[in-house]
Amino acid sequence: MSMDVKETKKLDQNKLYIIIASVAIVLILIAVLAFSKSKNGNTQNGAQNGGTPQTTQLSIVNEQGNFESTIEANLEPVRNIKLGTSLKKIQKMEKKQKDTDNGSITNAEDGSGYSYLTYNFIAGATIPQFFGGTVNATDQAANLMYVLKDKKLIEVRINFGASTPDNYDAIVATNTAKYGEPNLVRSYSNGTKTTFWRTKKVMLAAYSQYDANGSYSISIYYSKVD
């Protein structure tokens, strides 16, 4: 009879352990679900505030103008280096500048004849404004790139690094005052914009975007129109 009592106590203890373990598992699941919901809510709120990129597909919310149209304007080149300039002349002229490093060149491996001459800005140096915009030289993503085809310049790209919408607005205002209204302005669902000034020979394009970390950046492309 005492053996039955011991077995009963043992069974009761096993049941108690099972109940405790089950409750613990349920509590863990509740905590995980609550954390996941909170994290998703914070991500969505951040995106709505412009702090992080939207998780939904980017869409155009406003568009004014026509990309295919052209304006009558003399779009001034970067550093007074005209499109069509040879690689050696660009390197010679850029070597005189005090706001960039020695630069590096990468050639396309597909035999297309494209090459990319890139200069990083020197933090602490006096860097001029480009098209009315201020470069963030402390950001390693900021650089000046010359795109060449068969060693002839066809495009110049200025990456301003981490920036602000005010800097973008200053760029638009400066070039609108100088060249007139842009051909096309697009506004996107995450608050970024693209603006184009296009002549029959040259196009100036300003882009803003948010990266994966929610940092706002600006790029300008000055390129040959084919």
Image (cartoon, rainbow, N blue to C red):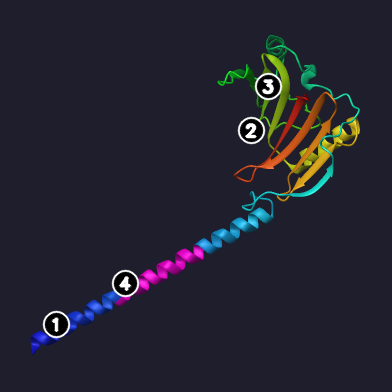
Identify which amino acid the numbered label 2 is placed on.
Answer: Asp
Disc 4 designates what residue? 21
Q: Is residue 117 left or right of residue 164?
A: left
Write the residue at 71% across / 27% down: 157
Disc 3 designates what residue? 147
Q: Nearer the viewer, mark 4 or mark 3?
A: 3
* Mark identifier at residue 7: 1
Closer to the chain start, of discs 2 and 3, is: 2
Q: Nearer the viewer, mark 4 or mark 2?
A: 4
Q: Position of residue 145 (x, y in %)?
A: 67, 23
Q: Is residue 166 visible?
A: yes
Closer to the chain start, of discs 4 and 1, is: 1
In the image, residue 27 sits, relative to residue 217, either above or below, namely below
Q: Are marks 2 and 3 in contact (CB under 8 Å)?
A: no
Closer to the chain start, of discs 1 and 2, is: 1
Residue nearer the viewer, 55 or 95: 55
